[in-house]
Image (cartoon, rainbow, N blue to C red):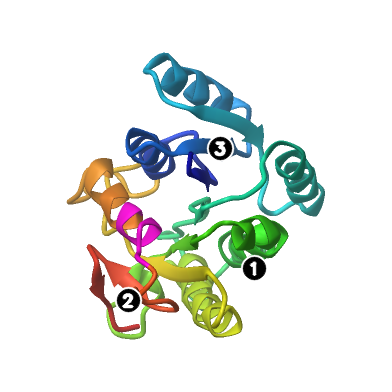
Amino acid sequence: MQTALVTGANRGLGKETARQLAEKGFKVILTSRSEAGRAVAEELRAAGYEVDFHQLDVADGQSIAELTDYLAENYEYLDVLINNAGIHHDTFQNTLNADFSIVEEALRVNTIGPWRVSNALMPLLKNSSAGRIVNVSSSSGSFVDSWPGTPAYSVSKCALNMLTLKMAADLKGTNVKINSVCPGWVRTAMGGENALRDVSEGAASIIWAALIPDDGPSGGFFRDGQSMSW
């Protein structure tokens, strides 16, 4: 059975991505910073899906180490890693009045978190016949499509796109591919009720990148399977 791990999967886009992966026959390791993810895992198991749960705070090195040890003891490989956990869509500030504690936390969670988790789980991904990493990003991190405001979020997502590009180069010649995905403006706690897409549409874009074939791209930025400029 193929295995997938989703960070920040206790609600919204992460929860729906976990559900869609499970629906496609994956065993999903659902993670979240809070214990709320445990109830989500139980809900999905009750629906007949193969779901495991482990607590994970992507900004905490000890939490990442504990997850890594758990996976090493219980899994021989990991086929898909979805770096979905994110924070601070800071519409209330701009670069001139930014609260740097918020900026620093956004970078720790949105950029450094995926970097550390990816590195920690890389041995398991390399044990897969076709390891895939999907970094959930945003067009707010694009030089082409971004908009005023949300400085912490936008800068952290732009950095995530660069991390994707750099890591893809370092993984060249291996069985692991990595791409960034913009799920679009999705109706979640972060996206708000006026967003244009529901979570199923946003998650489908992420699933596309998780299932990229061996001859597919690596190091790119995509929405709905289409390459995006950034």
Rounded to the nearest angstrom, the CA distance separating label 3 from label 2 is: 32 Å
Q: Residues within 10 Å of mark 2 (few under 14, many from 20)?
A: some
Q: Is residue 64 left or right of residue 46?
A: right
The disc, 3 or 1, on the residue closer to the chain's N-terminal end is: 3
Which amino acid does the dot numbered 1 rest on? Phe
At horizontal 55% and vertical 85% (from top left) the residue drawn is 169
Rounded to the nearest angstrom, the CA distance separating label 3 from label 1 is: 33 Å
Q: Identify which residue, 10 or 195, lies in the foreground.
A: 10
The answer to whether 200 is drawn above or below residue 119 in the figure is above
Q: Disc 2 marks which residue? A: 146
Which amino acid does the dot numbered 3 rest on? Ile
- 3 or 1: mark nearer the eye: 3
Q: Which mark is residue 100?
A: 1
Q: Disc 3 marks which residue? A: 29
- 2 or 1: mark nearer the eye: 2
At horizontal 33% and vertical 34% (from top left) the residue drawn is 23
Q: Secondary structure at mark 1?
A: helix
Q: Magenta stretch?
A: 207-213
The disc, 3 or 2, on the residue closer to the chain's N-terminal end is: 3
Where is residue 156? Give x, y as percent: 53, 70
